[in-house]
Protein backbone atom coordinates (compact mmCIF):
# COMPACT_ATOMS: atom_id res chain seq x y z
CA UNK A 1 0.00 0.00 0.00
CA UNK A 2 1.25 3.49 -0.89
CA UNK A 3 4.27 2.01 -2.61
CA UNK A 4 5.27 -0.20 0.31
CA UNK A 5 5.12 -3.96 0.75
CA UNK A 6 4.75 -6.52 -2.00
CA UNK A 7 7.59 -8.33 -3.73
CA UNK A 8 10.97 -6.81 -4.63
CA UNK A 9 11.68 -5.75 -8.21
CA UNK A 10 13.89 -8.82 -8.68
CA UNK A 11 10.93 -11.18 -8.13
CA UNK A 12 10.21 -13.13 -11.33
CA UNK A 13 6.62 -14.31 -11.28
CA UNK A 14 7.32 -16.71 -14.15
CA UNK A 15 9.68 -18.65 -11.89
CA UNK A 16 6.93 -19.22 -9.29
CA UNK A 17 3.96 -20.32 -11.31
CA UNK A 18 1.61 -23.08 -10.25
CA UNK A 19 2.48 -26.62 -11.26
CA UNK A 20 1.35 -27.05 -14.88
CA UNK A 21 -0.99 -29.80 -16.00
CA UNK A 22 -0.80 -31.90 -19.12
CA UNK A 23 -4.23 -31.68 -20.74
CA UNK A 24 -5.78 -33.73 -23.53
CA UNK A 25 -9.25 -34.86 -24.51
CA UNK A 26 -11.23 -37.59 -26.23
CA UNK A 27 -14.55 -36.39 -27.55
CA UNK A 28 -15.68 -33.69 -25.12
CA UNK A 29 -14.06 -35.41 -22.11
CA UNK A 30 -11.05 -33.46 -20.87
CA UNK A 31 -8.33 -35.29 -18.92
CA UNK A 32 -5.38 -33.79 -17.03
CA UNK A 33 -2.34 -35.09 -15.17
CA UNK A 34 0.49 -33.60 -13.14
CA UNK A 35 2.84 -36.38 -14.26
CA UNK A 36 5.43 -35.86 -16.95
CA UNK A 37 5.96 -39.61 -17.09
CA UNK A 38 2.37 -40.63 -17.76
CA UNK A 39 1.74 -41.99 -21.26
CA UNK A 40 -0.24 -39.96 -23.76
CA UNK A 41 -3.98 -40.09 -23.19
CA UNK A 42 -4.98 -42.43 -26.00
CA UNK A 43 -2.24 -44.89 -25.08
CA UNK A 44 -3.38 -44.78 -21.45
CA UNK A 45 -7.03 -45.39 -22.34
CA UNK A 46 -6.50 -47.90 -25.14
CA UNK A 47 -8.45 -48.06 -28.42
CA UNK A 48 -11.54 -49.82 -27.04
CA UNK A 49 -12.06 -47.22 -24.30
CA UNK A 50 -11.50 -44.36 -26.76
CA UNK A 51 -14.12 -45.82 -29.09
CA UNK A 52 -16.60 -46.09 -26.22
CA UNK A 53 -16.05 -42.44 -25.25
CA UNK A 54 -16.35 -41.25 -28.83
CA UNK A 55 -19.57 -43.24 -29.21
CA UNK A 56 -21.19 -41.14 -26.46
CA UNK A 57 -19.70 -37.81 -27.51
CA UNK A 58 -20.93 -38.16 -31.05
CA UNK A 59 -22.00 -34.49 -31.22
CA UNK A 60 -21.04 -31.28 -29.36
CA UNK A 61 -22.38 -31.43 -25.81
CA UNK A 62 -23.81 -29.09 -23.17
CA UNK A 63 -24.00 -29.48 -19.39
CA UNK A 64 -27.59 -29.63 -18.09
CA UNK A 65 -27.00 -30.35 -14.41
CA UNK A 66 -24.50 -31.14 -11.68
CA UNK A 67 -24.78 -32.61 -8.19
CA UNK A 68 -22.36 -34.08 -5.62
CA UNK A 69 -22.70 -36.53 -2.76
CA UNK A 70 -20.47 -37.59 0.13
CA UNK A 71 -20.05 -41.36 0.43
CA UNK A 72 -18.53 -42.69 3.64
CA UNK A 73 -16.61 -45.47 1.93
CA UNK A 74 -13.22 -46.20 0.43
CA UNK A 75 -13.10 -45.04 -3.18
CA UNK A 76 -11.84 -48.39 -4.44
CA UNK A 77 -15.10 -50.04 -3.39
CA UNK A 78 -17.02 -47.67 -5.64
CA UNK A 79 -14.53 -48.41 -8.43
CA UNK A 80 -15.38 -52.08 -7.95
CA UNK A 81 -19.10 -51.32 -7.89
CA UNK A 82 -19.12 -49.74 -11.34
CA UNK A 83 -17.29 -52.77 -12.72
CA UNK A 84 -19.38 -55.41 -10.94
CA UNK A 85 -21.94 -56.48 -13.52
CA UNK A 86 -23.46 -59.03 -11.12
CA UNK A 87 -25.03 -56.37 -8.96
CA UNK A 88 -27.17 -54.72 -11.63
CA UNK A 89 -29.94 -57.30 -11.47
CA UNK A 90 -29.43 -58.14 -7.79
CA UNK A 91 -29.17 -54.71 -6.15
CA UNK A 92 -31.11 -52.39 -8.45
CA UNK A 93 -34.72 -53.52 -8.26
CA UNK A 94 -35.78 -50.64 -10.50
CA UNK A 95 -33.86 -52.28 -13.35
CA UNK A 96 -35.59 -55.63 -13.03
CA UNK A 97 -39.03 -54.32 -12.02
CA UNK A 98 -39.39 -52.22 -15.15
CA UNK A 99 -37.45 -54.41 -17.57
CA UNK A 100 -34.35 -52.26 -17.98
CA UNK A 101 -32.18 -55.28 -17.08
CA UNK A 102 -33.00 -58.76 -18.33
CA UNK A 103 -30.81 -61.88 -18.31
CA UNK A 104 -31.75 -62.69 -21.91
CA UNK A 105 -30.87 -59.22 -23.15
CA UNK A 106 -27.93 -58.86 -25.52
CA UNK A 107 -24.91 -57.57 -23.62
CA UNK A 108 -21.16 -57.23 -23.91
CA UNK A 109 -18.18 -56.12 -21.84
CA UNK A 110 -14.73 -54.86 -22.81
CA UNK A 111 -11.68 -54.56 -20.57
CA UNK A 112 -8.51 -52.64 -21.30
CA UNK A 113 -5.64 -55.01 -20.61
CA UNK A 114 -3.19 -52.36 -19.39
CA UNK A 115 -4.97 -50.40 -16.65
CA UNK A 116 -8.26 -52.22 -16.31
CA UNK A 117 -10.62 -49.59 -17.69
CA UNK A 118 -13.93 -51.27 -18.46
CA UNK A 119 -17.05 -50.79 -20.54
CA UNK A 120 -20.23 -52.86 -20.32
CA UNK A 121 -23.36 -52.27 -22.33
CA UNK A 122 -26.76 -53.74 -23.09
CA UNK A 123 -28.84 -53.60 -26.24
CA UNK A 124 -32.59 -53.04 -26.25
CA UNK A 125 -34.20 -52.29 -29.60
CA UNK A 126 -37.24 -50.02 -29.19
CA UNK A 127 -38.99 -51.56 -32.18
CA UNK A 128 -38.99 -55.02 -30.61
CA UNK A 129 -42.13 -55.89 -28.61
CA UNK A 130 -41.42 -56.90 -25.03
CA UNK A 131 -42.33 -60.50 -24.20
CA UNK A 132 -44.30 -60.08 -20.97
CA UNK A 133 -44.40 -63.77 -20.11
CA UNK A 134 -40.67 -64.15 -20.72
CA UNK A 135 -40.02 -61.15 -18.48
CA UNK A 136 -42.11 -62.71 -15.71
CA UNK A 137 -40.10 -65.93 -15.91
CA UNK A 138 -36.77 -64.08 -15.78
CA UNK A 139 -37.53 -61.71 -12.93
CA UNK A 140 -40.28 -63.50 -10.97
CA UNK A 141 -41.94 -60.05 -10.72
CA UNK A 142 -45.22 -59.60 -12.62
CA UNK A 143 -45.12 -56.60 -14.94
CA UNK A 144 -48.37 -55.28 -13.43
CA UNK A 145 -47.04 -55.41 -9.84
CA UNK A 146 -45.82 -51.84 -10.06
CA UNK A 147 -46.30 -49.01 -12.53
CA UNK A 148 -45.01 -45.49 -13.08
CA UNK A 149 -47.30 -42.47 -13.14
CA UNK A 150 -45.05 -41.08 -15.86
CA UNK A 151 -43.90 -44.01 -18.04
CA UNK A 152 -42.07 -41.63 -20.38
CA UNK A 153 -39.21 -41.87 -17.88
CA UNK A 154 -38.34 -45.22 -19.48
CA UNK A 155 -38.89 -44.16 -23.07
CA UNK A 156 -35.87 -45.08 -25.17
CA UNK A 157 -34.92 -42.87 -28.09
CA UNK A 158 -32.17 -43.60 -30.58
CA UNK A 159 -30.33 -40.28 -30.47
CA UNK A 160 -26.79 -41.70 -30.57
CA UNK A 161 -27.28 -43.90 -33.60
CA UNK A 162 -27.37 -47.45 -32.25
CA UNK A 163 -29.51 -49.76 -30.12
CA UNK A 164 -27.41 -49.60 -26.95
CA UNK A 165 -29.75 -48.65 -24.10
CA UNK A 166 -27.33 -48.89 -21.17
CA UNK A 167 -23.60 -48.29 -21.06
CA UNK A 168 -21.39 -48.02 -17.98
CA UNK A 169 -17.76 -47.20 -18.73
CA UNK A 170 -15.32 -47.21 -15.81
CA UNK A 171 -12.24 -45.22 -16.76
CA UNK A 172 -9.24 -45.98 -14.55
CA UNK A 173 -8.87 -44.86 -11.87
CA UNK A 174 -11.69 -42.53 -10.85
CA UNK A 175 -14.20 -41.71 -13.60
CA UNK A 176 -17.40 -43.34 -14.86
CA UNK A 177 -19.08 -42.38 -18.15
CA UNK A 178 -22.68 -43.56 -18.27
CA UNK A 179 -25.66 -43.84 -20.56
CA UNK A 180 -28.84 -45.07 -18.91
CA UNK A 181 -31.44 -44.57 -21.59
CA UNK A 182 -31.24 -40.85 -22.37
CA UNK A 183 -29.51 -40.02 -19.07
CA UNK A 184 -25.93 -39.14 -19.99
CA UNK A 185 -23.50 -38.36 -17.17
CA UNK A 186 -19.92 -38.36 -15.99
CA UNK A 187 -19.24 -39.46 -12.40
CA UNK A 188 -15.98 -38.33 -10.84
CA UNK A 189 -14.65 -39.76 -7.58
CA UNK A 190 -12.74 -37.29 -5.38
CA UNK A 191 -10.95 -38.99 -2.48
CA UNK A 192 -11.23 -37.11 0.82
CA UNK A 193 -9.77 -39.72 3.19
CA UNK A 194 -9.42 -43.54 3.28
CA UNK A 195 -13.01 -43.90 4.42
CA UNK A 196 -14.72 -41.07 2.56
CA UNK A 197 -15.06 -39.76 -0.98
CA UNK A 198 -17.14 -37.25 -2.90
CA UNK A 199 -18.92 -38.40 -6.02
CA UNK A 200 -19.60 -35.57 -8.48
CA UNK A 201 -22.24 -36.15 -11.15
CA UNK A 202 -22.18 -33.99 -14.30
CA UNK A 203 -25.22 -34.49 -16.52
CA UNK A 204 -25.11 -33.49 -20.16
CA UNK A 205 -26.94 -33.55 -23.45
CA UNK A 206 -26.18 -32.40 -26.97
CA UNK A 207 -26.10 -28.81 -28.13
CA UNK A 208 -28.56 -29.58 -30.92
CA UNK A 209 -31.10 -31.16 -28.54
CA UNK A 210 -34.55 -29.69 -28.93
CA UNK A 211 -36.23 -28.41 -25.76
CA UNK A 212 -38.41 -31.50 -25.47
CA UNK A 213 -35.37 -33.80 -25.65
CA UNK A 214 -33.65 -31.80 -22.90
CA UNK A 215 -36.76 -32.24 -20.73
CA UNK A 216 -36.68 -35.96 -21.49
CA UNK A 217 -33.02 -36.16 -20.40
CA UNK A 218 -33.85 -34.31 -17.20
CA UNK A 219 -36.59 -36.86 -16.48
CA UNK A 220 -34.19 -39.71 -17.14
CA UNK A 221 -31.67 -38.17 -14.73
CA UNK A 222 -33.99 -39.31 -11.93
CA UNK A 223 -32.52 -42.78 -12.40
CA UNK A 224 -29.01 -41.55 -11.44
CA UNK A 225 -27.48 -39.36 -8.77
CA UNK A 226 -27.56 -39.47 -4.95
CA UNK A 227 -31.32 -40.20 -4.83
CA UNK A 228 -31.63 -41.90 -8.22
CA UNK A 229 -34.10 -44.74 -8.68
CA UNK A 230 -31.17 -46.86 -9.86
CA UNK A 231 -28.10 -45.29 -8.26
CA UNK A 232 -29.48 -44.71 -4.76
CA UNK A 233 -28.43 -48.19 -3.63
CA UNK A 234 -24.82 -47.90 -4.82
CA UNK A 235 -23.71 -45.35 -2.25
CA UNK A 236 -25.44 -47.23 0.55
CA UNK A 237 -24.04 -50.58 -0.59
CA UNK A 238 -20.40 -49.47 -0.61
CA UNK A 239 -20.83 -47.88 2.83
CA UNK A 240 -22.21 -51.17 4.17
CA UNK A 241 -19.29 -53.03 2.57
CA UNK A 242 -16.80 -50.58 4.09
CA UNK A 243 -18.17 -51.33 7.56
CA UNK A 244 -18.53 -55.04 6.89
CA UNK A 245 -14.95 -55.77 5.84
CA UNK A 246 -13.36 -54.22 8.90
CA UNK A 247 -11.69 -56.84 11.06
CA UNK A 248 -11.12 -56.64 14.82
CA UNK A 249 -8.22 -54.25 14.27
CA UNK A 250 -10.00 -52.27 11.56
CA UNK A 251 -8.44 -54.20 8.67
CA UNK A 252 -9.24 -57.23 6.56
CA UNK A 253 -7.47 -59.16 3.82
CA UNK A 254 -9.35 -60.32 0.73
CA UNK A 255 -7.40 -62.34 -1.83
CA UNK A 256 -8.11 -62.07 -5.54
CA UNK A 257 -6.34 -63.75 -8.45
CA UNK A 258 -5.72 -60.72 -10.66
CA UNK A 259 -3.86 -62.80 -13.24
CA UNK A 260 -7.25 -64.06 -14.41
CA UNK A 261 -8.28 -60.54 -15.48
CA UNK A 262 -9.06 -61.29 -19.12
CA UNK A 263 -11.63 -60.03 -21.56
CA UNK A 264 -14.79 -62.06 -20.89
CA UNK A 265 -15.92 -64.75 -23.27
CA UNK A 266 -19.38 -64.90 -21.71
CA UNK A 267 -22.20 -62.31 -21.63
CA UNK A 268 -21.90 -59.40 -19.22
CA UNK A 269 -22.79 -60.31 -15.67
CA UNK A 270 -21.28 -63.77 -15.46
CA UNK A 271 -17.71 -63.08 -14.35
CA UNK A 272 -15.51 -60.85 -12.18
CA UNK A 273 -12.96 -59.98 -14.87
CA UNK A 274 -13.64 -56.24 -14.75
CA UNK A 275 -13.04 -56.11 -10.98
CA UNK A 276 -9.87 -58.17 -11.38
CA UNK A 277 -8.76 -55.83 -14.16
CA UNK A 278 -9.11 -52.80 -11.91
CA UNK A 279 -6.90 -54.33 -9.21
CA UNK A 280 -4.38 -55.48 -11.78
CA UNK A 281 -4.04 -51.93 -13.13
CA UNK A 282 -4.03 -50.43 -9.63
CA UNK A 283 -1.23 -52.70 -8.40
CA UNK A 284 0.75 -52.11 -11.59
CA UNK A 285 0.84 -48.38 -10.90
CA UNK A 286 1.37 -48.74 -7.14
CA UNK A 287 4.35 -51.05 -7.73
CA UNK A 288 5.87 -48.94 -10.49
CA UNK A 289 8.07 -47.07 -8.03
CA UNK A 290 9.24 -50.32 -6.45
CA UNK A 291 10.86 -51.63 -9.63
CA UNK A 292 8.45 -54.58 -9.82
Image (spheres, helix red, strand yellow):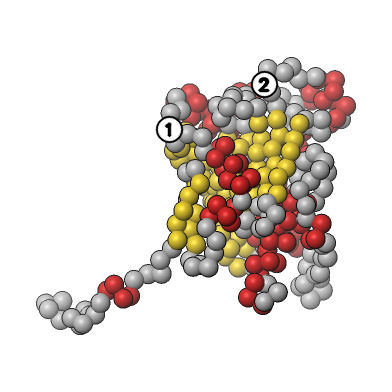
Residue marked by disc 1: 207
Residue 213 appears in the rendering: yes
Q: Label 2: which residue?
A: 126
Residue 241 spot, x, y in % from top left: 76, 58
Q: Foreground: 188 or 67?
A: 188
- Give the quadrant of the C terminus: bottom right
Tell me which residue sits at (75%, 63%) in the image.
Answer: 243
For the residue labelled by badge 1, is the local secondary structure a helix, a strand or a loop?
A: loop
Residue 90 visible? The answer is no
Residue 174 screen position, x and y as percent: 60, 56
Instruction: Tell which of 81 and 36 is nearer to you.
Output: 36
Residue 63, percent from left and from top: 45, 40
Find numbered disc 2 in the image and state the secondary structure of the residue it sits on.
Answer: loop
In space, the residues marked 1 and 2 are separated at their CA atoms by 24 Å
Q: Is residue 235 above or below residue 11?
A: above
The residue sitting at the left extreme is: 2
Quarter in which the N terminus is drawn: bottom left
Which residue is rendered at x = 75% and y = 28% of the image?
A: 99
The image's mark for residue 237 is none
The answer to which quarter of the image holds residue 242 is bottom right
Amino acid sequence: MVGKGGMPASFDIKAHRMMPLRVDKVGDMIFATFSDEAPDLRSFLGPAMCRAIERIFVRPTKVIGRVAQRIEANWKLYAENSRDSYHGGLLHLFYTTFGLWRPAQDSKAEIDEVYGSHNSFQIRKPQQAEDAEKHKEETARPLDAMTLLDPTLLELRQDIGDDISLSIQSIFPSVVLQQIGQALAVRHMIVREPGAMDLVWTYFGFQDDEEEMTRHRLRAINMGGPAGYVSLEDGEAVEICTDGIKGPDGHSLILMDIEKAENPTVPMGLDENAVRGFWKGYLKLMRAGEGQ
